[in-house]
């Protein structure tokens, strides 16, 4: 018998769920047939696993169009947070200045704050407008003589606004300043082209729109990036050396890799390539637009970070991530109602981006974030609209 009230999952910006079936199959196969340590030993199975890891490195390097065109500069990490920490701590030197924005996730704000508290760096926060967008001129205005790096999210995880990365990339390149892009929300949904965007490093995570498992992500390092290792240990190469090797990828990788996660990520990327990244985006945008149209008549609902409280549609430069508040009630309360009475899963609160909420005026009550995935349907959206009508109609 089918479940009369199945879970409707609208928390894909936190992590995508469910995953495409081949992801679990690939991970199961890998665990039963191949889960040996790559690169550490000379036996056949280890070499085969090493080849699989190298293939996925190469694929990631091409996926992000790294101008370095060196697969060894695609470094595996646990997630985007790990990648951002490796980049920030590996690049910043005492006395450096960093430019970032109020839209950032705590995975950027916290490492920068910790380094600032330790007296190592200073940083400036560039504001955003009512559309959740940062003005490149405002970035340019705070760049100073000791600015080493600009760090920006590709798209806000609160309101979905895609940022003017190409313009910021051009101005960073002109001034010889490194540009680190947080592609946690965009990788797998819109192209992240390091060459076209003039980005020096990309941090990504495997478990969101790339549809892979949790625990795998990466940092793609472009050419001419002066980055040192901040974690040291076993690499399986040059074991007689007591110093950590400086060549990539080992410079930034220490310890056993999450090979099962890498196998799952590769299967997820196959699935995305077969479907077409644009097809997936259009599907999710269609759902987001249906949702916006459905709630348009509800006066107690405000949509945040897009200038007006009832946008007719998503706009070309937004991801299918929508933040709403209902009658100024605490977001938690709304989330609980949707969960308990309708079995709808959403994310409430500040979504780890407190300054974005401050900019949108929702820092006190937080927002209810609805984010769509490839397995959501229009009837899921209609149920969510019915639930909100019930609450705010
Ligand atoms: C914009 C942004 N950056 C970074 C992260 C951190 O990703 P992870 O939890 O995979 O490290 C997230 C996750 O929500 C995010 O939305």
Image: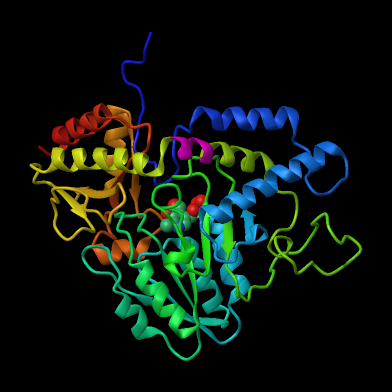
Where residue 226 sits: x, y (%)? 63, 76
Tell me if 217 is positioned left or right of 377 in this view: right
Q: Which residues are magenta?
A: 269-274
Judge whether 268 appears above or below 242 on screen.
Answer: above
Classify residue 311 as left or right of residue 49.
left
Residue at x 81% of width, y 36% of height: 45
- In front: 40, or 280? 280
Task: Tell me which residue sits at (36%, 58%) in the image.
Answer: 155
Residue at the extreme right = 240
Q: Position of residue 32 (x, y in %)?
A: 72, 27
Q: Is residue 124 visible?
A: no
Provide residue 35's location: percent of width, then percent of height: 74, 36
Residue drawn 65% across the image and 28% down it: 28
| Magenta stretch: includes residue 191 | no
Question: Toward which corner of the image does residue 297 lie, by quadrant?
Answer: top left
Residue at image location 13% in from the left, 50% down from the top = 310
């Amino acid at each position: 018998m089918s479940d009369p009230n199945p879970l409707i999952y609208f928390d894909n910006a936190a992590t995508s769920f469910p995953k495409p079936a081949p992801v679990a199959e690939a991970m199961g196969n890998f665990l039963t047939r191949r889960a040996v340590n790559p690169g550490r030993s000379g036996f056949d199975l280890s070499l085969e696993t090493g080849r699989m890891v190298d293939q996925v490195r190469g694929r990631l390097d091409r996926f992000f169009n790294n101008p370095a065109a060196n697969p060894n500069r695609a470094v595996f990490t646990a997630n985007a947070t790990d990648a951002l920490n490796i980049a920030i701590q590996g690049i910043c030197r005492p006395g450096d200045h960093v430019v970032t924005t109020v839209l950032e996730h705590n995975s950027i704000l916290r490492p920068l704050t910790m380094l600032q508290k330790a007296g190592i760096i200073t940083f400036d926060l560039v504001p955003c407008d009512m559309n959740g967008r940062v003005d490149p001129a405002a970035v340019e205005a705070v760049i100073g003589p000791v600015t080493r790096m600009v760090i920006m999210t590709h798209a806000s995880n609160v309101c979905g606004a895609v940022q003017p990365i190409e313009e910021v990339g051009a101005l960073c390149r002109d001034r010889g300043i490194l540009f680190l892009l947080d592609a946690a929300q965009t990788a797998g949904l819109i192209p992240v082209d390091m060459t076209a965007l003039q980005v020096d490093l990309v941090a990504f995570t495997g478990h969101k729109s790339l549809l892979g498992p949790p625990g795998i992500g990466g940092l793609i390092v472009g050419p001419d990036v002066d980055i040192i290792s901040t974690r040291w240990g076993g690499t399986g190469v040059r074991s007689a050396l007591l110093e950590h090797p400086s060549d990539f990828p080992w410079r930034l990788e220490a310890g056993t890799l999450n090979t099962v996660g890498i196998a799952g990520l590769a299967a997820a990327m196959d699935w995305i390539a077969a479907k077409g990244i644009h097809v997936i985006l259009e599907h999710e945008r269609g759902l987001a637009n249906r949702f916006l149209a459905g709630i348009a008549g509800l006066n107690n609902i405000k949509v945040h970070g897009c200038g007006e409280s009832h946008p007719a549609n998503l706009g070309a430069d937004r991801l299918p991530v929508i933040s709403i508040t209902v009658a100024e009630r605490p977001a938690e309360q709304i989330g609980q109602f949707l969960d308990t009475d309708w079995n709808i899963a959403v994310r409430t609160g500040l979504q780890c981006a407190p300054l974005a909420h401050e900019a949108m005026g929702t820092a006190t009550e937080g927002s209810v974030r609805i984010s769509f995935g490839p397995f959501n349907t229009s009837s899921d959206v209609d149920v969510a609209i019915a639930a909100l009508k019930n609450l705010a109609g």
